[in-house]
Amino acid sequence: EAGVVQSPRYKIIEKKQPVAFWCNPISGHNTLYWYLQNLGQGPELLIRYENEEAVDDSQLPKDRFSAERLKGVDSTLKIQPAELGDSAVYLCASSPGMGETQYFGPGTRLLVL
Amino acid sequence: AQSVTQLDSQVPVFEEAPVELRCNYSSSVSVYLFWYVQYPNQGLQLLLKYLSGSTLVKGINGFEAEFNKSQTSFHLRKPSVHISDTAEYFCAVSGNTGGFKTIFGAGTRLFVKA
């Protein structure tokens, strides 16, 4: 069974540029999460989807971050414009349902110069 | 509100020695507790979880953890570590308030030396 797929694995951009990350969850998993992981820290939830509905986006900086999961399967997280402080690893995870074990992708490591 | 504290940021240990990684949590409701491992340049992988029932939980790779409600702890243990156990370990808590939002600790870096 394929795991959670994320692309790209690495991204280097200049500040003020836009960037997008893509995630394909495990087949059949209704819940999808985007996390931010800073160096030396644990993951922090940005947004959680139940199917195509965003049920928790309270930690998403909505002035520059946006996300979508149009058909309730794969998802895209976008930053526009990127700032130096956005340099981090962006993790995607999925689970069969709310409260169940989360399965993580390898992450996208973003460096903003 | 829920929170997780991992008491050690780094734990160096010699190969074949026992190890304990400490985790304390705070929550006003019933909790689910997890330990995840993260190898370099990889995502997190579930080691074990406590949902209910027996307070001693066994996971993969010989790890186990004990849920102690009175001390609000969920320490991770392994009786004999291997070089390959070198990784970052995260404790996490989830509860049935806030829609089962999962809160992660800051992580403990386990470094196994030969």
Image: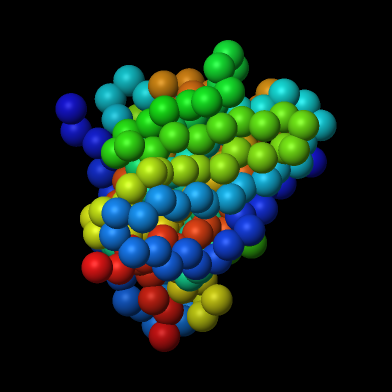
Residue name at image x 26 percent, y 44 percent: A5
In-front residue for pair B79/A25: B79
Q: Quadrant of residue B48?
A: top left
Residue name at image x 28 percent, y 25 percent: A27
Q: Is residue A105 left or right of residue A33?
A: left
In-front residue for pair A71/B108: B108
Position of the N terminus of chain A, as image quadrant, is top left
Question: What color scheme is it?
Answer: rainbow
Q: Give the residue furthest to the top.
A: B53
- In the rendered image, the vertical position of residue A113 relative to residue B105, given as above or below: below
Question: Residue B5, position in %: x, y?
Answer: 66, 53
Q: Quadrant of residue B50?
A: top right
Question: Residue B45, position in %: x, y?
Answer: 35, 42
Asked whether residue A76 is in view, the answer is: no
Asked whether residue B37 is in view, the answer is: yes
Q: Is residue B3 left or right of residue B33?
A: right
In-front residue for pair A94/B74: B74
Q: Is residue B80 left or right of residue A81?
A: left
Q: Give the residue furthest to the front.
A: B17
Q: Quadrant of residue A21?
A: bottom left
In-front residue for pair A95/A19: A95
Residue name at image x 39 percent, y 76 percent: A111
- In the rendered image, the vertical position of residue B46 relative to residue B84, given as above or below: above
Question: Residue B42, position in %: x, y?
Answer: 30, 55
Residue name at image x 67 percent, y 32 percent: B68
Position of the C terminus of chain A, as image quadrant, is bottom left
